[in-house]
Amino acid sequence: MEKFQKLHGIAAPMPLVNIDTDMIIPKVFLKTIKRSGLGVNLFDEMRYDRQGNEIPDFVLNKPQYRDAEILVAGDNFGCGSSREHAPWAIADFGIKCVISTSFADIFFNNCFKNGILPIILPQEQVDILMADAEKGANARMTVDLESQEVTTSDGEVIPFEVDAFKKHCLLNGLDDIGLTMEKQGAIESFEAKAAAQRPWV
Amino acid sequence: MTAPKTLYDKIWDAHVAHEADDGTCLLYIDRHLVHEVTSPQAFEGLRMAGRQVHAPDKTIAVPDHNVPTTLDRAKGIENEESRIQVEALDKNAKDFGIHYYPVDDVRQGIVHIVGPEQGWTLPGMTVVCGDSHTATHGAFGALAHGIGTSEVEHVLATQTLIQKKSKNMKVEITGKLKPGVTAKDITLAVIGKTGTAGGTGYVIEYCGEAIRDLSMEGRMTVCNMAIEGGARAGLIAPDETTFEYVKGRPHAPKAGQWEQALEYWKTLYTDEGAHFDKVITLKGEEIEPVVTWGTSPEDVLPISATVPSPEDFTGGKVEAAKRAIEYMGLTPGQKLTDIEIDTVFIGSCTNGRIEDLRAVADVVKGKKVKDGLRAMIVPGSGLVRAQAEEEGLAEIFKEAGFEWRLAGCSMCLAMNPDQLSEEERCASTSNRNFEGRQGYKGRTHLVSPAMAAAAALTGRLTDVRDLM
Ligand code: SF4
């Protein structure tokens, strides 16, 4: 997994509440064999009309937000199914951080498994960041995971909380697999013991 | 002396490779089954990280969800996305050197039927698959459950799963079943009693005389649907029936190790006095042949009953029942035996084994499928199909007017060409009656193979005992 340390980038505002996983990536894209490549279909039904043309009003279609790396979103982001295609699509688009007042539980955890930092902040602070994001491409935000701070384009600093273990994993680019592999010794000694006790397995 | 343990406790304890301070464990996985739908991203993840499959010997793949079951399937899969998923599995199996049963192999079939059939699933093992019906393998006294795609990748890379232990639940079925009542009726009756969330957070152990009396096929049917009750897994302690089934299978322990394995397997039972967090008991004699009327597996009623009305329920279920009755096109008070059906589907990992087909043959022998009704039988594996042909069952089916298909998931889910059309009503031996499960706006009634056979003859939901 890619490390997440410090991000200085464009933030796109999506004030809509209850953005669910079906909106993030509709069901028709689940027959894919890849987790990459879903970025073009991120927010598919909001982003394109039925003929596949871009809807110019949609935030990520606007020239100033096409390279957004941060999403500032309304409450209860990522609710709905457990499909991991949702964070896959977000990451594939290039978004590495989502900020909201709350997230659906499974989506929240799936983000960390895919190198995305979800940040939960109180309403007033999300409002400040939303207003900052509205300013467009010149207003870059900074998200510093190490110091646990978001800095607006005006230099206002907003601290945030993050689970210590999850922070450690993101900072060092450790996914679950990477971490488990650190316990390779334990796995191998288990295998040796099991092979002696249950050789038929 | 150590505290008495449940069967689940014993299997769990034997597989903990590492335990963190907060109780999070690395559970070692003995068998990893793989199919084409939930695995491509996991293999892609391995490639991207330059990782190998940790234990290719313990990893078994077979395509099942997307494969057509028509006799001409050798000509290839028409739907492009389905074909790509199957081809991806072909390639991944080859590149990573895992055991593989491709579409044209006689041993191909539904992953949960192939595993036990080939002797990959053995008592006391941990078994996972990126598929919720992995619970099936619990019939052998194996701890078996479904996992997500990230977890599939985790198991491929490390042969372990990050887990916290579940609670223990006992489901006891006492006494004997009445004639015409089968394993499917047991498992549906249990869900009818506990609800679809009744097992959430638990591993269920099924026990009692009625369970002991079941064949391995029947036990697999019971455990298969543990997931529909919300449980993480279902288990049945291994016994002579289990050992008899396993013996001689291609990947079962061979002479020399067999005795050693048997000795260990005989220790796999719940100790006297072991603690269960929840206990449910059903009397075997009281279980009737059942059907589902709604769009959740918990919507179960005896075939002698009538369609309920939303007012019979409380809370959120009132709305749900209303929606289900409308979706299913039923009228409250209508007799279940008056419900006419268009299609009969016999197959799936719940009821696609040889014993299921024998039960169907018993009912339909020398009779005819109702005129105009679509009736298909899809064996769970190529070997089940071959055996049914050898036993003369296939002839009985064809003479009665059933389509006799090749192995796969088929109409259990709408991912291959076998689908219901809008408002088409099906008596199905599969496991899920969700909206759209068998096709957009399709209507599913879950039943046992014998009940499905009876429905095929009469063209409506029927008490199989009336035909016996
Ligand atoms: S038969 Fe149905 S339930 Fe079983 S594995 Fe196939 S799709 Fe899933």
Image (tube, helix red, strand yellow):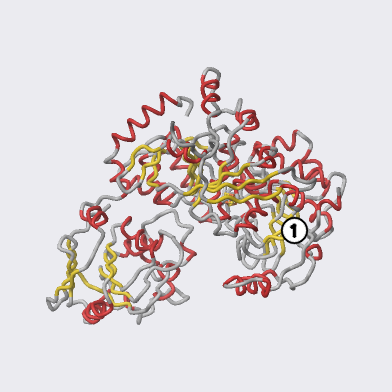
Residue B95, image x, y percentages: 41, 38
Q: Is B370 displayed left or right of A200 in the figure?
A: right
Which residue is found at the position 29% from the left and 41% from the top? A181
Answer whether residue A114 is visible to the viewer in this image: yes
In the rendered image, which quarter is residue A105 located in? bottom left
What's the amino acid at mark 1?
Pro
Q: Is residue B268 above or below residue B419?
A: above
Circle 1 crowding by C-alpha within 10 Å: few under 14, some 14–19, many from 20: some
Of A59 and B362, the residue lying toward us: B362
Q: State the residue position of label 1.
A: B302
In the rendered image, which quarter is residue A156 located in? bottom left
Q: Is residue B60 above or below residue B428?
A: above
Q: Is residue A164 above or below residue B364?
A: below
Residue B230, image x, y percentages: 54, 55
Residue B415, image x, y percentages: 57, 57
Q: Determine the secondary structure under disc 1.
A: strand
Residue B225, image x, y percentages: 60, 51
**Residue at mark 1: C-beta within 8 A of ligand 1:** no
Which residue is found at the position 41% from the left and 26% from the top? A195
Answer whether residue B111 is visible to the viewer in this image: no
